[in-house]
Image (cartoon, rainbow, N blue to C red):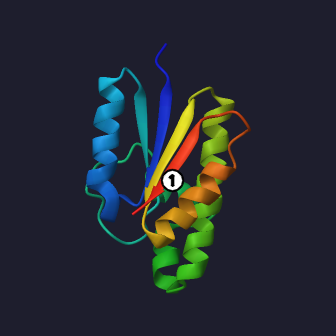
Amino acid sequence: MKKKLLVVATLDTKGREAEVVKNRAQELGVEPLLMDIGVVGVPQTKPDIANTQLVEAAGYTLDELIRGHNRPRAIEVLQEGGRLMVNRLLRHDKLDGAIGIGGGTGTSVVSYIVKSLPYGLPRSWTST
């Protein structure tokens, strides 16, 4: 069975970088899952876990967040939705490690999500 790697990124701004990580993981025999933590931009690559799924996991809709014009709240919702989604993946044995890519805000969201993983599960993130 292939190992599963979660790749967390703001796919509207870091989609190309996430695609490189995804392709390299596949070359190494690892199954990547792309999670989009962007709010308003169009993803540069297709996510496996869309931002809409994250905000819905946290009890909101993406449209609500965009209309609210409250960036700090949107970030909190993405963090919580991402944490919930990661825990769901863990419960179903669909996660063996995680890597995140982000700028300033993206790194904040990535670190919140990735830090929720249990001790011993490989994780890393890069701030660009």
Judge whether residue 114 can be spotted in this image: yes
Up-down: is 74 above or below 4?
below
Q: Amino acid at mark 1?
A: Gln
Percent x, y for residue 58? 64, 60
Percent x, y for residue 86? 61, 44
- Dividing the picture into quadrants, the one containing residue 80 is bottom right
Up-down: is 17 above or below 4?
below
Q: How many marks?
A: 1
- Give left or right: position of 71 versus 23: right
Percent x, y for residue 12? 32, 63
Q: Which of 17/48 is in front?
A: 17
Q: Which of 25/2 is in front?
A: 25
Residue at position x 47%, y 83% in the image: 67
Up-down: is 76 above or below 21?
below
Judge whether residue 81 can be spotted in this image: no
- Give left or right: position of 63 versus 47: right
Q: Quadrant of the C terminus?
A: bottom left
- Dividing the picture into quadrants, the one containing residue 27 is top left
Residue at position x 54%, y 56% in the image: 54
Residue at position x 30%, y 55% in the image: 15
Q: Residue tagged by mark 1?
A: 53
Can you name the residue that lies furthest to the top here?
1
Q: Which of 28/60 is in front?
A: 28
